[in-house]
Image (cartoon, rainbow, N blue to C red):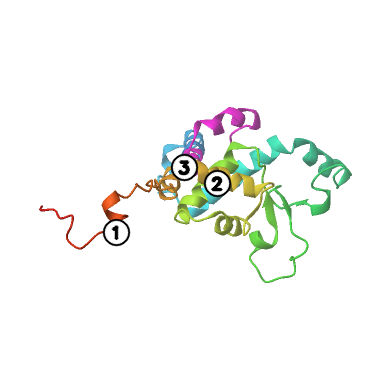
Amino acid sequence: MCSCSTTNSRRHFIKFFKLNRLIRVIVYYTRFTNTCRTSKANRHTITLSSQDLGQALTCCAKMVQQISYSQEIKELGEKQEFAAYSTFKTLHPFPDKNYLIRFGERIQQSTLPYQTRLQMIRSANHHLTMLILSAEHLNLPHAGPQFLIASLREKYWIPRIRNLMRKTIHQCLNCYKLNAQATQQLIGELPPTRLQPSRPFLNTGVD
């Protein structure tokens, strides 16, 4: 599905500020390259499907893991395990059929969906992870950090996800407007006529 190289993807991801646009560009780019290699009689021009978008997202995830966890993937391929000092040692990760690093042995026997039982590991320092957080924040209409973390944990395992969620919500303009603090008016000083006792109707006024 994916024809983008890992080295070129380092600078291409930063050009996009929306996950949906990034995924669609990858799908159209892949279709264009495949169309150029086939004859006109065998070319197909159909609308984008959810399967095409899912394959493009999987392609992006694979490239990000190859960029962010190149040493861990090398160790996992050679020794079938991570080094003792690796932060993933306690997670018991493994590559799936698409060569994506996943983990989730504790709930592997549950009836939950595959992506929930075996969550995909994503880098906290990559631009694609921030795009995913922003897209999920918009899909769940500007929800709070706890709800967003619970929703993302159904698919991904992201280190330091709480700090990333606070950063995502802080950068959202709509959330900033809704959570803005109202100005507090200073209490004014009362006039002497309201503080000093006097007989009725001693001070009157006409509008």
Outermost residue on the left side: it is 206
Left or right position of 6 against 20: right
Residue at the image position 46 percent from the left and 37 percent from the top:
39
- Quickly name the residue at label 2: 132
Q: Residue 14 lies in magenta, yes or no?
A: yes
SS class, disc 1: loop
Magenta-drawn segment: 1-26
Q: Amino acid at mark 1?
A: Pro
Q: Position of residue 132 (x, y in %)?
A: 55, 46
Disc 3 is placed on an element classified as helix
Q: Earlier in the sequence, mark 2 or mark 1?
A: 2
The residue that mark 1 highlights is 197
Query: In this figure, which residue is indicated by the disc labeled 3?
Result: 24
Q: Position of residue 176 (x, y in %)?
A: 45, 45
Tell me which label, 3 or 1, sits earlier in the chain: 3
Using the rendered image of the protein, determine whether residue 92 is visible from the camera's viewpoint.
no
Tell me the distance, in whole angstroms, between the alpha carbons under discs 3 and 2.
14 Å
Residue at (58%, 48%) from the top-left corner? 165
For mark 2, give the secondary structure.
helix
Residue at coordinates 63% horizontally, 44% vertically from top-left?
61
